[in-house]
Amino acid sequence: MKLGSLLAIVGDQPVFETGFLLAGDVDPADVRRQLSRWVTSGHVIQLRRGLYALAPPYRKIEPHPFLVANRLVRGSYVSLQSALAHHGLIPEHVPVTTSVTTGRPQHQENPFGSFEYHHCPPNRLTGLSVEKLGGVQEALVATPAKALADLIHLVPGADSRAYLAELRLTNLEKLDLAALRAPAVGDRPKIRRAFRLIVALAEGRP
């Protein structure tokens, strides 16, 4: 496979997997060898085994960090501070894309940013939505209530009034208060305590 053929196949893809190139009458071993050569020559960026992106100036679409986060670790979703910022619930810019996975916690860095993954058990994989990121890109992202639940679950002391005040939650009118009361999301005493405080804030109660 020549570089021109690669660009014709994946030029419109923000990232691509090796399997995307193996359709038709091709030699898989040859494709993998050529990908390795393109990585060495700087034409292609390897994000993990089997996952790649075109290097500039060859790529047409800049991969969104949320898309990259989903694809780096299969089965993960963007949550915690990154999802809260995406939904406009915290004012700070979040320099690291934070995600949740049923796999091991890990940290990865590549040309598209820094990515942190926190572990949660499989029975907590609820409250997710597919978010459009512009163009062909989309990613699995926690809803506002789910992102809050994940944060409270993972951070010690996050059910305290002091911690919630430090978050400086904004645009609380965007919160689905029914979702904050839903057992599927707030299913632990710690989360329920924090959600009661957040509901009081959203309703203007002290």
Image (cartoon, grey):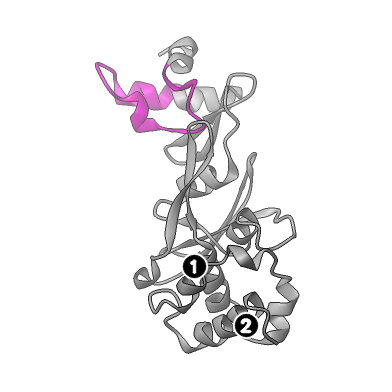
Q: Residue furthest left?
A: 25
Q: Nearer the viewer, residue 178 or 165?
A: 178
Q: Looking at the rendered structure, which numbered label has been put on residue 65? A: none
Q: Secondary structure at mark 1?
A: helix
Badge 2: how crowded within 10 Å, few (<14), some, or many (20+)?
few
Q: Which residue is mark 1?
A: 146
Q: Nearer the viewer, residue 139 or 144?
A: 144
Q: Which residue shows up at 50% across the image and 61% down it? A: 143
* Spot occupied by residue 115 in the image (x, y as percentages of width and height): 59, 53
Q: Quadrant of the N terminus?
A: top left
Q: Which residue shows up at 48% across the image and 89% down it? A: 189
Segment tinted magenta in the rendering: 9-34
* Spot occupied by residue 31 in the image (x, y as percentages of width and height): 37, 23
Q: Quadrant of the C terminus?
A: bottom right
Position of 122 relative to 117 (above/below) = below
Task: Report if residue 206 lies within the magenta region.
Answer: no
Q: Nearer the viewer, residue 55 or 95?
A: 95
Position of 114 relative to 4 (above/below) = below
Badge 1: how crowded within 10 Å, few (<14), some, or many (20+)?
many
Inspect the image, locate mark 1, and give the three-letter code of the amino acid beneath it: Lys
Q: Which residue is mark 2?
A: 200
Q: Secondary structure at mark 2?
A: helix
Q: Which residue shows up at 56% across the image and 70% down it? A: 148
Q: Nearer the viewer, mark 2 or mark 1?
A: 2
* Spot occupied by residue 9 in the image (x, y as percentages of width and height): 41, 18
Inspect the image, locate mark 2, and give the three-letter code of the amino acid beneath it: Ala
Classify residue 188 as left or right of residue 91.
left
Mark 2 vs mark 1, CA separation in Å: 18 Å
Residue 161 appears in which quarter of the rendering? bottom right
